[in-house]
Image (cartoon, rainbow, N blue to C red):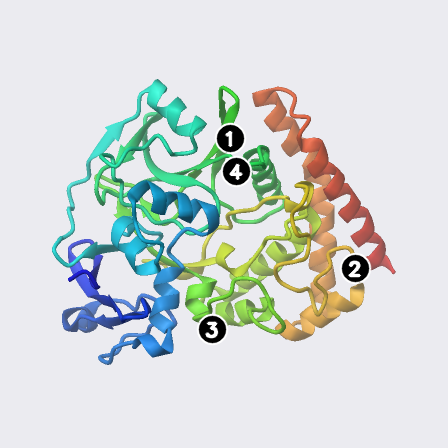
Amino acid sequence: MDDELNVWFEDQLIGYLWRNASHVMAFRYAEEWLASGFPLSISLPLQHDAFSAHTFIAHRFFAHLLPEGQARERLCHRFRCPNTDFDLLKTIGGECAGAISILPITEEPDLNQRYEKLSAEALARLISTRGASLTNDDKPRLSLAGAQDKITVYIKDKDIYLPLKQSPSTHILKFEVSDFKNVPLYEVYTTGLAKAAGLNVIDMTWGCLGEASYTLSTRYDRLLGDNISRIHQEDFCQALGLQEKYQRNETPSFAQCYRLLIQYSNNPTIDCEQLLRWQIFNLIAGNSDAHIKNISLLYSAAGTRLAPFYDLVCTRAIKHLDGILALSIGQQKNPDNVLITDWHELAKQCQIRPKRMLSLVEDMLNKVNEQKAGVRGSLEAKYGELPALQRVDQVINKQLKRLSVSILN
């Protein structure tokens, strides 16, 4: 029993998850789910046979639901949980990205949606401690990928609540990153600029309590009604069945993601252009951490679509972070060395006309240049002067100038 978990969608059993002696996970769909359910992933199609541990396919999908780095280590310490993918899913897998819940086989889903209101004092403690003030008695079941400390919350009438047990959340509360105090502000600014430049992004707000800042993001994989419904999604690491989110040699590549959208999106024309604009924007905005776990597919009643973009941060404004691009442009990974030939190569990889690629680059350069002052002005009108954004503007201005020259030449 310690080595088995059940995977649920609401009160319907999707399948069974277990691990071998080496802690590698395997998965098999339940027979009832095969009759009428949806596949968890493009990489996990509906089939009677199990996805065995030795293939590592199931393990990759489920492991990508989990936090990473120090955020993961702090969760393991807080819950006194062994730092393995299986044990962490067993502890916090009740509320994941998308539509699934992962529970011990001795538990069944609790569909009662219950929430505990956070007082102003409790919220202040939560933000100042980056979530560490939650006690084991709270035990919200949540699993969100990424390296940044975050929790899921429910917001109603501007009040913030903690979901109890497996109750679905509506928002993600992200805290400051240790040693990188300005990351929440950088993310709100970069996301706002992306939206102004025409990208479909998540709704996000920034706030401060005392000396600590945070962001609140609306979950695109939740549907509000009399009750909150979960909408299934998966990131591109999961969809492609890959372990690595950063490009190493040829894989994963931007072109792989582009082809995936062509094959599976219900509106590939719009979604593929959005993806191209996302890649271009990240180069202009200095977001070198735009890896494939930061793009997702959303499975709703309207079909399969590219999800709104998230985790948009000008990382090049942060000292001591690697500036090399997460995904190459053509064959180029140095953001300071991207030339017109690299855009031609990216167009070739995606099988689109170079002229079309260059027109998208030029259009995005113009939009960012036109919108950045207004986006910063709106933030400062709401929060007062924000001198920390000067570093972001310096990165963007440098990129605008350099890329404009490279395109013209």
Residue 24, percent across and down? 33, 69
* Label disc, if present, on residue 263 of the rendered structure: 3
Give the quarter of the image for residue 48. bottom left
Mark before the other along the chain sequence, 1 or 2: 1
Quadrant where the image shows the N terminus: bottom left
Asked if residue 38 lies left or right of residue 373, the reply is left
What amino acid is at disc 2?
Asn
Looking at the rendered structure, the secondary structure element under dot 1 is: strand
Instruction: Name above or below for residue 385 compared with residue 407.
Output: above
Q: Out of 304 and 187, give the one closest to the viewer.
A: 187
Q: Residues within 10 Å of mark 3 (few under 14, many from 20)?
A: few
Is residue 171 in view from this perspective? no
Residue topped by disc 2: 337
The CA span between labels 1 and 4 is 14 Å
**Residue found 44% across the figure and 45% down from its top:** 71
67 vs 332, nearest the viewer: 67
Q: Secondary structure at mark 2?
A: loop
Q: Position of residue 220 (x, y in %)?
A: 40, 47
- Per the rendering, the mark at residue 388 is none
Inter-mark Cα distance, 3 to 4? 37 Å
Q: Are marks 1 and 4 in contact (CB under 8 Å)?
A: no
Task: From the image, tell me which residue sits under label 4.
Answer: 177
Please report whichever mark, 1 or 4, sits nearer to the chain's N-terminal start.
Answer: 4
Q: Earlier in the sequence, mark 4 or mark 2?
A: 4
Indicate which label's residue lies in the foreground, 4 or 2. 4
Residue topped by disc 1: 206
Kindly indicate the quadrant of the structure image that contains residue 358.
Answer: bottom right
Q: Identify the mark nearer the N-term, 3 or 2.
A: 3
